[in-house]
Image (cartoon, rainbow, N blue to C red):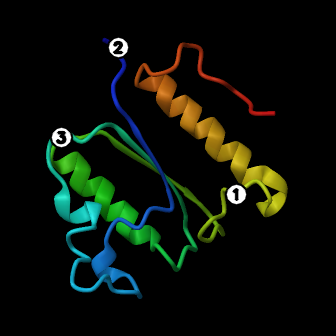
Amino acid sequence: MSSRPNALILFNPGLDQTRAQVKFKGRAREGSPFHHLRAGVPPTLILHGKNDTTAPYAVSEQFCIEMKAVGNECRLIGYEGAVHGFFNPRVAGGKWYRETLLEADRFLTKIGYLREPSPTTIL
């Protein structure tokens, strides 16, 4: 059995479907991680574009606050000027793709999922 913890790495997540433009036939709350927060959720890293209009950045901010309030680890990294899907390799010449991979590796190293040292660059 592995001693490594579970972890969540979320890219522009839709954490509250009750706010979504497309409703899910009365089941939006049921499918919204925001409405199921409890102690014991794995350490979570959220990588989110601050100009995302599909999954608003403010929801991720509030989600992290609520995660911490119930004793969970949550780290949010916001990217200025980035929209939904900003982390794809074809966007901005892959700049944000490399940056988000690097942050994911750093986070996974911090929680013991990857071995030290943390990477400093992604090629």
Q: Which residue is mark 1?
A: 88
Where disc 3 sits, the SS reads: loop
List the single residue furthest toward the front.
25
Q: Give the labeled residue for mark 2.
A: 2
- Tell how many labels: 3
Name which of mark 2 and mark 3 comes first in the sequence: 2
| Residue at 59% from the left image edge and 70% from the top image edge | 84
Of tags 1 and 3, the one toward the viewer is 1
- Residue drawn at the location 66% of the way across and 56% of the way down: 87
Q: Which residue is nearer to you in this view: 65 or 39?
A: 39
Sooner in the amino-acid sequence: mark 1 or mark 2: 2
Q: Quadrant of the N terminus?
A: top left
Q: Which mark is residue 71?
A: 3
- Residue positioned 21% across, 73% down in the render: 29
Pointer 1 and pointer 3: residues touching (CB < 8 Å)? no
Neighbourhood count class around disc 2 (C-alpha, 10 Å): few under 14, some 14–19, many 20 upward: few
Which residue type carries mark 2? Ser
